[in-house]
Image (cartoon, rainbow, N blue to C red):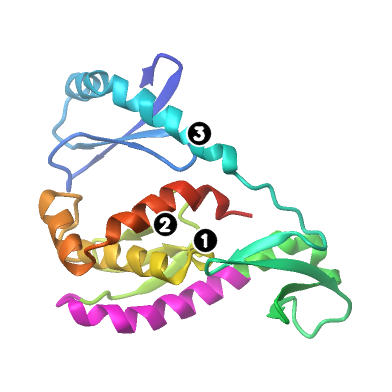
Amino acid sequence: MKLEDIDITIEKTERRKTVSIFIERNGSVRVLAPISATDEKIENAVKAKEYQIFAKLARWKELNQGKVSREYVNGQSFLYFGRNYRLAIEENQDMPLKISGGFFRLDKKHLNKADKVFKDFYRVKAEQKIKERLKLIEGKFQQKPTTIKVLDLQNRWASWTPKNGLNFHWKCAMAPVPVLDYIITHEMVHLKHPNHSTEFWNELDKKMPNFREYEVWLKQNGVKMDL
């Protein structure tokens, strides 16, 4: 489906009761609709929200002006749980990548695959931290996740699975811990309320009354959380 020059991806799911429109972090437009929704109904819903879609896309372009293009060179900064660490290229290091003395230290012989080395590092550290923070958070909830996985989720910070597993993006290792706590809490609420219904937002507000400040932080700074 297209709206003027904008390609729109449509995804139908049994869990949806209404048509919702989302602007993804990469600027794409995604429509989630019930399986029963006709093409005409979806098209009418999109046209009815045409102004909001273009307004959100304009805001997305504004926020993405702060996108950081990182290179694997001495002095380049990389985020790690909300702090910036400069990169130092080292000779004959005992591991491919580590944080030491206030620096990310990358062994020179791994420079040609630095992107993978960083992602692997973030994935391991994110899983460790998420499990650590989850122990402090899950006491507020009756439902517990069946699995915790850290993956490349493309345009999502985290996701819930129908079997009550929770998946998190490796980029979560770049977020400040309070923001990470919000991402975890958001997904924990999904164990009870799979959709972003009124009940979901009310429950999230009970569990984390200041959650909106972290939502705003992610919208403003999420574009910087990348390699």
Task: Please tell me whether mark 1 sits on a helix, a strand or a loop.
Answer: helix
- Return the residue at label 1: 171
- Return the residue at label 2: 157
Near mark 1 (Cα within 10 A), the count class, few <14, some 14-19 or many ≥20, is many
Q: Position of residue 40 (x, y in %)?
A: 19, 18
Near mark 3 (Cα within 10 A), the count class, few <14, some 14-19 or many ≥20, is few
Marks 2 & 1, CB-CB < 8 Å contact: yes
Marks 2 & 3, CB-CB < 8 Å contact: no
Extent of the magenta region: 121-143
Considering only order in the chain, which callout, 3 or 2, is on the residue closer to the N terminus?
A: 3
- Quarter of the image that includes the C terminus: bottom right
Please state which amino acid type lies under the numbered disc 1.
Lys
Please state which amino acid type lies under the numbered disc 2.
Trp
- Quarter of the image that includes the N terminus: top left
Position of residue 159 in the picture relative to residue 224 (left or right): left
Q: Position of residue 44 (x, y in %)?
A: 20, 19
> Residue 88 magenta-drawn?
no
Position of residue 103 in the picture relative to residue 174 (left or right): right
Task: Please tell me whether mark 2 sits on a helix, a strand or a loop.
Answer: loop
Residue 1, label in figure: none
Q: Nearer the viewer, mark 2 or mark 3?
A: 3
Considering only order in the chain, which callout, 1 or 3, is on the residue closer to the N terminus?
A: 3
